[in-house]
Image (cartoon, rainbow, N blue to C red):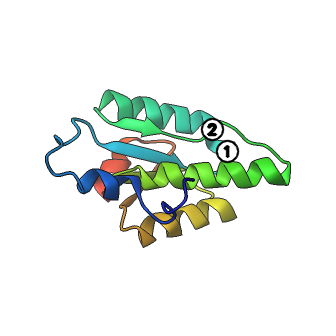
Amino acid sequence: MAEGWEGVRFMDVVSAFPELPEPEFPVTTICGSMRYFDQMIECARNLTESGEVVIMPFSVRQDDEMKEKLGRMHRQKIEMANTVVVVGAYADISTREEIAFARELDIPVAYWDVESYEELRTEW
């Protein structure tokens, strides 16, 4: 990250320029245990078809350096979101940390039932 930009959210920078047009589509970041990767793809497809820009994790590495880097990258993805959607019934430690991070930033968190996309909307 460039020096002096620590703690600055992407959406804060965008909102600092009110003359810019509002984005046409909301941004949603998907979080969850990678054991639900197939369900994340299904959720992303549904959200995309409903008119949302979707950001989600795509890589899992076990070495500490890459795992830490991927964690930082995913937090940045959360910062870019209007909404965070958690996929799956099980939330591992990193998923719980991501939920807490989104809430700290006042980003709404929704939960996607792996069996029924419709349940997501009722919880927003």
Q: CA distance from mark 2 to mark 1?
A: 5 Å
Q: Quadrant of residue 48?
A: top left
Q: How many residues crowd around disc 1 within 10 Å: few (fewer than 14), some, or many (20 or more)?
A: some
The local secondary structure at tag 1 comes to: helix
| Left or right position of 30 against 72 | left
- The residue located at (35%, 61%) in the rendering is 108
Residue closest to the far front: 3
Q: Identify the amino acid type marked 1.
A: Met
- C-beta proximity under 8 Å, tags 2 and 1: yes
Identify the element where label 2 is drawn: helix
Which label was assigned to residue 34?
1
Percent across and percent down for residue 60 are 74, 42
Relative to 11, is 61 on the left or the right? right
- Indicate the quadrant containing the C terminus: top left, top right, bottom left or bottom right: bottom left
74 and 3: which is toward the camera: 3
The answer to whether 61 is drawn above or below residue 48 in the figure is below
- The x, y position of residue 109, in whole percent, is 41, 60
82 displayed left or right of 70:
left
Query: Residue at image x 36%, y 35%?
Result: 53
Note whether 27 is above or below 8 in the view shown: above
Residue 82, visible in the rendered structure? yes
